[in-house]
Structures are given as structure tokens and as C-alpha cells.
Image (spheres, rainbow, N blue to C red):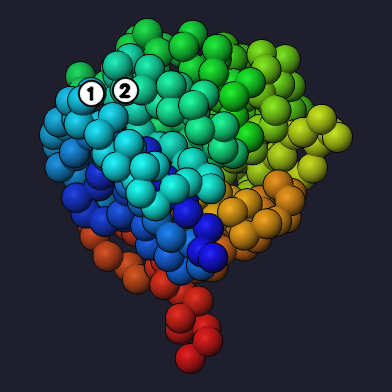
Amino acid sequence: MLPRILVIAGSDSSGGAGIQADIKTITMLGGYAMTAITALTAQNTCGVQHITITEPDMLSAQIDACVEDIGVDVIKTGMIPDAASLSIVRDTISRLQRPVVFDPVMVASSGATLQQAGLQEALLDMLPLLEVITPNIPEAQTLTGLPISTREGMETAAQALRAKGARAVVLKGGHLPGESVVDLLLTTEGPTWLEQPRIETRHTHGTGCTLASAIATYLGLGHTLEQAVRHAQAYVYQAIADAPGLGEGYGPLHHAHPLHASG
């Protein structure tokens, strides 16, 4: 049976990130994608123009409709815009007891950061419920309050998240300069560094969403967390390398690249 992945995240009208990127990724990697949309956004490769947050009852109804009929094997989260949405997500995770890949893309409609929106503490309290959290460097800095400018800083921040209850952390290192991009997987077994050559490109819109959805799908397919992260990183790397060159800003990835590779 296809692994059933429930994505709780925001919609990207331009199709490069959010729910749209999640569906493309999960489908391409052999999973079945379901969605509970937390917010509608009007956005493109140049930025976000407008956000409308989903009413709590509607968010809950979307989740319940999927759970009660199709069922869920893995949960992947993305943009969580407010405290009411986060509360629903927490209740869902606690109730279903399924592996959770949590990508902390949390933006208030005002454009406020995670900390300003008052969601940071609530998220930190959720860490023990998650299979893995996948922050980039700015998100990890917000969650831990620690500066990150080196690999050592990445490991210190990841250890801080582990100390707060995270079972595993994938800290994405793309914001650090260098010829390579280095991600860190930190688990109870210690750190694993995953390094790939940097692709000089502006077409990176949706990389975080795509990576987290790929990890969730590979977990649903029965891979270990390290295997899932390695496979997901390889998928994202090729999606960036084959980016179609769309948009005037940070363009989308080529999520369907496996179809072209297979002819």
C-alpha cells in the first residue's frame, strides 16, 4: 500500500513551495498525499503578497476527513500561522501517534517572526512528540537563541534542540557560505554530516518544504531516519540542479525530475 502522508501546511499560489511542493514531492517518491491547509497565500517567486489563515474549525475538519476515511501513516507539517492552528496540530499529533516530520515554517499574517507571534514556547513544548524537526539556520537561531555561523555552531544549536526534547534534528546548513552545503542530522546516536556541492542558483524556492516531505515519504516507505534524510537530500539536490528557471525571483525546483531521468 502507498504510504499515506498527511501534510498540514500553507498553500503557495505559485506552486513552488507549501502544499503544492509537498504534493508533488510525495507523489513523485511513491506516497499518497493528503492535505489540511492552514493558510492561503498569494505569493510568487518574488515574495508573499497576502495571507488568509484557515478558520480553526475548517482546519480540524480537513484533518478529520482524511483520518476517518483514508488513514495516516506519517504527518508532515509546514507553515503554522497562529496559536489556534498550532493547538490543533498538537492535538492531532498526540491523538494519532504517527511519525511527524516538522518543518518549522511559522509566519503570522502580519509577517511577525515565530518568537514575536508567541509560538516559540508552544513549539518547543511539542518537540518530544516529533520524529524529527527540520529547521534551517535562521529558524534554529530563533528556536534556540544561539548564533550560528559555523558547523560547530550548527551542532551546538542542534544539541540545544535535543536537550529541549527533540528526538532528532535535521539542521539545514544552506545559509552558511562555502563551496559545499552541509546539513546536520543529530540523533541519540550522535551527529551525521551530509555534504553536497553547492549549486550556484537563485532557484531554491520550496527547498525546505520539499526536503521535509521527501523525508516523510521515505519514512512511510520503511526507511530508517538516516536513510530517509540521505535519499531526501539527493532528491532535493537534483531538483535544484534541474530547476526550470521560472520566475523573476527565487524560482521553483523541478520536482518531476525522476520522470525525465527514467525517460
Under tag 1, what secondary structure? helix
| Residue 207 x, y percent position in the rendering | 46, 50
Q: Secondary structure at mark 2?
A: helix
Report the amino acid beneath label 1.
Answer: Pro
Q: Mark 2: give few (<14), some (14-19) or many (20+) Cα within 10 Å.
A: many
Q: Residue 19 placed where, x, y %? A: 32, 48
Residue shown at 15% from the left, 31% from the top: 52
The quadrant where residue 55 appears? top left
Q: Are marks 2 and 1 in contact (CB under 8 Å)?
A: yes
Q: Is residue 107 visible?
A: no
Q: Position of residue 46 (x, y in %)?
A: 23, 46
The number of numbered badges drawn on the structure is 2
Left or right: 51 in relation to 92: left
Which residue appears farthest toward the front when viewing the image? Answer: 68
- Nearest the viewer among 82 and 237 is 82
Residue, disc 1: 56
What's the distance in space between the residues labelled 2 and 1, CA to CA? 6 Å
In the picture, which quadrant includes the N terminus? bottom right
Q: Which amino acid is tagged 2? A: Ser
For marks 2 and 1, the one nearer the N-term is 1
Note whether residue 93 is visible: yes
Question: Where does label 2 land, which residue?
Answer: 85
Given residues 47 and 28, the one toward you in this image is 28
- Residue 184 in the figure: left or right of residue 216: right
Dot 1 alpha-carbon crowd within 10 angstroms: few under 14, some 14 to 19, many 20 or more: some
In the rendered image, the vertical position of residue 136 relative to residue 90, given as above or below: below
Residue at the location (25% across, 47% down)? Answer: 12
What number is the disc on residue 212? none
